Image (cartoon, grey):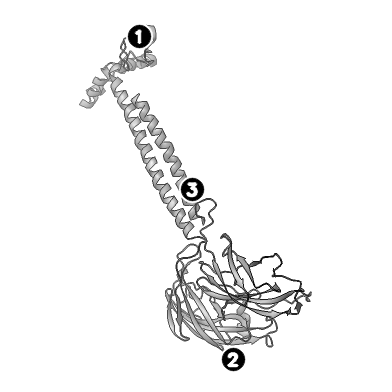
Amino acid sequence: MRCYNCHKNFDYEKYYGICPKCGCFNQQETREERHEDLHDRFGDSYDHKEERHQGASDSRMAGVSEEPRRTAGPAGRKRTGSRGKGLLIFSVIIFAAGIAVLGSGIRAGLLAAAGSAAQSDETVPLIAHEAGERFDFQQGSLQVLEAVKLADRETLPGLEEGMQLIAVHVAGESDGEYEDYNRIREPYLETDGIFRYSISAHEFEPYGQILGARPALDGWELTGESSCDGWYGFVTEADAQEIRIWFDEYDWSDWDGGKLLAAHCVDLQIEGPETEAEGGLTDAE
Amino acid sequence: MQNRGRTLVSVVFLVIGAVFLAAGLIFWVGSAGGGTGFFGMGSAEKEAYCVVEYLGSEEIGSSYEGVQADEGYSFYELRFSVRNEGNREAYREMPYLYYKGENYDDVHDYWDTPEEPEEEEVLFAGYYEPCLPPGRTGTASQVVQVKDGVSKFTAVYAPNYDSADTELGIVLS
């Protein structure tokens, strides 16, 4: 017998089909012989006559099966070769994908590092407006109308010494959509270079109602509402007369707390408490 | 032999590619999760970055808010401008400053105060403390005790929590 792999002639019986040179197992019987063997083993006498008369492809198959097993040698090598080539192509694809993902990952990391704790290179545009002026803000507009002193420590003893409670009247409009882009970041109050947060609507509301500044506004006032008209509360120094209110305009699509686009400010004079401080009601009310 | 070489090359490419792929994914996940993707390089979260400038000082004298200055010291009020160059508000009007002079005891920024009766809780607690929004410049001041004869010293601060210390020259006016 001749080995299908290395073509060495050897004695099939002596070596049980195993090539003494390369170790390949060589089958002596043809596919048909093995088929007959199955019939013998299971006592089946079906002769496959009908199947043999079916189309040319079957007869071609039969022709192939009649070929000695050794002719399958080059075909087997071809299959092994194509498998090796497939592995190489797969490896190259993984390698290229790895390079691409690593490159973009490093770039993303560098961008994140550049935009992190480091100083912001962008200067926030600071835009000044007049009291009563309607200005574009995010998807709508805002209008800062007036600032009113509501109480000092004499009228509201719970206030910290030397401080007063004021309210700033603000009106706004939006597209009325219940979307985050209509959210308003709570404003800051600046007095002589000192900035303070606005009092949360939740804490300011009861005092605003008693002292005539209602309704209290919060950051969601234009979310799902087409307009709002109300008051933000602040504490500031008791002797402060001139103040500046800041509204920060954000792009809320930024996942990390919004991207600051601009800061709008309005200078105001604090009016006395004798003015009745009552704003309009929100649409919801 | 040729097949074996090809398989070896394939395996090498596969292993290197897998390593690159894994490393790239780690960078992506790291940067998307709020970090920079680089170990030990901080985070991508927005932060304040406060740059302090010294504006001047004013001598207060030997007593301040009922406290007598230590012997050989006087109270001074130091004025600063603070610019927030970060992208998030600072929760204080100024970073913490600590002072160092030629001698360790040139400047005291703390002292004992007379014990005060327990204060009642104020209305709107938390809204009195100044802050500094991003992109804006505020003012701040601090009172310190300075040893007589000392006219200049250094204030040291960190613009934000993971930045290096910055030194600020203080010359008393």
Of circles 2 and 1, the one toward us is: 2
Q: From the viewer's perspective, is residue B98 above or below residue A153?
A: above
Q: Position of residue B157 (x, y in %)?
A: 60, 65
Q: Is residue A115 left or right of residue B9?
A: right
Circle 3 packing at 10 Å, graded few (<14), some (14-19), many (20+), is some
Of circles 1 and 3, the one toward us is: 3
- State the CA–CA distance, disc 2 to disc 3: 60 Å
Disc 2, SS: loop
Circle 2 packing at 10 Å, graded few (<14), some (14-19), many (20+), is some
Name the chain letter of the residue that bears numbered label 1: A
Name the chain letter of the residue that bears numbered label 2: A
Q: Position of residue A257 (x, y in %)?
A: 51, 65
Q: Nearer the viewer, residue B79 or B95?
A: B79
Picture disc at residue A272:
2
Q: From the viewer's perspective, is residue A213 above or below residue B35?
A: below
Picture disc at residue B24:
none
Which amino acid, mark 3? Ile
Q: Position of residue A74 (x, y in %)?
A: 28, 22
Circle 1 packing at 10 Å, graded few (<14), some (14-19), many (20+), is some
Say which residue label 1 marks: A12
Q: Nearer the viewer, residue B84 or A8?
A: B84
Which amino acid, mark 2? Gly
Q: From the viewer's perspective, is residue B4 above or below residue B87?
A: above
